[in-house]
Amino acid sequence: MPDTRSETTIIATRESRLALWQAEHVRDLLTQRCGLDVELLGMTTRGDQILDRALSKVGGKGLFVKELEAALEDGRAHLAVHSLKDMPMELPAGFALGAVLDREDPRDAFVSPRHATLQDLPQGAIVGTSSLRRAAQLLNLRPDLRIEPLRGNLDTRLRKLDEGHYDAIVLAAAGLKRLGLAARIASVFDTATMTPAAGQGALGIELRDDAIELSRKLSTLVHRPSWLAVHAERAVSRALGGSCSMPLAAHAVWQGEALCIDVALGHAQALQRPLLRTRLSSPVASDSEADALGVRAAAQLRTLGAEDYLAAAA
């Protein structure tokens, strides 16, 4: 068990440039706001090692967090920093989500050296993404496109684009902005056209659920509006059994005191089939109300015929 009274707090992190930026950002916040002495423990996960197959075929998003959780469990680290969209919707027993930071831009970015928007691509253009969520929405917008797999860290994906393997690729705007690469964004998709993944753009901090004192300190980093929004989004995915094999999108935004959530579901085995979409809005002031909004949105999708789509992803 980690000794949270020790002088140095250790953050477990993946070693990609983006993951290190995220961990360093949390380190700086903990130093400035909590007066903690923080060090990073860089690790390579299975998700980083397996680059020739889609995540849905080799174990899903949990491949990016298991090694970090093992470090928390055996005491090598006290915290792990994740892109929240990469965190499984159900955490293993003994672990907790301690904080969600102020969310960066949640939108998807269209990245191309020659074309300004998706509509500008020629017929049959090759677009790179390994996300079924993105692929389903892209093909609903442009059925003529060729969607090709794209794995690797952010720099690797941009390099493959620059080498001419793709006419365009789709990436999270947040990662590009965090690494000072916003100039690579040709345009961003509005969230009604390309609905983001649950938690996209938000950073989550994971810890052991018995690290009470550290959890108290992390509470100073929580951005409550972001926390509630991603709770609603993740509740949709949990209610539908969401995974990497399901083209599911969920994005919540505040409208005054109400939280408005948009959900889109594609067919995993026929990505060009029409998306099922729903939108709900409700006043939200607590975790339970955010979860309830997400559960209601998932139930509404089922009334629209989601069972057939969910079965395709099983």
Image (tube, rainbow, N blue to C red):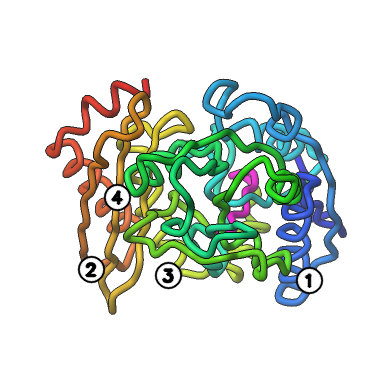
The mark lying in front, picked from 2 and 1, is 2
Residue type at mark 2: give it: Pro
Q: Of all residues shown, which one is farthest toward the front? A: 122
Relative to residue 39, is residue 130 depicted above or below?
above
Q: Looking at the rendered structure, which numbered label has been put on residue 31?
A: 1
Estimate how packed mark 4 is, as few (under 14), some (14 to 19) or many (20 or more) residues with alpha carbons within 10 Å: many
Q: Amino acid type of disc 3? A: Pro
Residue 278 at x, y percent in the picture = 21, 51
The CA distance from mark 1 to mark 4 is 37 Å
The residue most toward the left is 303
The magenta segment is 202-210
Circle 4: residue type: Val
The quadrant in which residue 245 appears is top left
The residue beneath circle 2 is 283
Coordinates of residue 231 in the picture (x, y in percent): 40, 54
Mark earlier in primary sequence (1, 4):
1
Q: In the rendered structure, does residue 191 fall within the stretch colored magenta?
A: no
Pointer 4: what residue? 263
- Dot 2 or dot 3: first in sequence order is 3
Residue 204 is one of the magenta-drawn residues: yes
Q: What residue sits 55% from the left and 60% below the top?
A: 115
Question: Dot 1, how many residues are within 10 Å of its Cα: few (below 14), some (14-19), or many (20+)?
Answer: some
Question: Magenta region's main secondary structure?
Answer: strand
* Image x and y of residue 174, in percent: 59, 62
Q: Is residue 105 above or below residue 239?
A: below
Assess whether mark 4 and mark 1 are in contact (beta carbons under 8 angstroms).
Answer: no
Pointer 1 or 3: first along the chain: 1
Between residue 130 and residue 100, name the one nearer to us. 130
Task: Quarter of the image for the N terminus: give it.
Answer: top right
Q: Are marks 2 and 3 in contact (CB under 8 Å)?
A: no
Mark 2 or mark 1, earlier in chain: 1
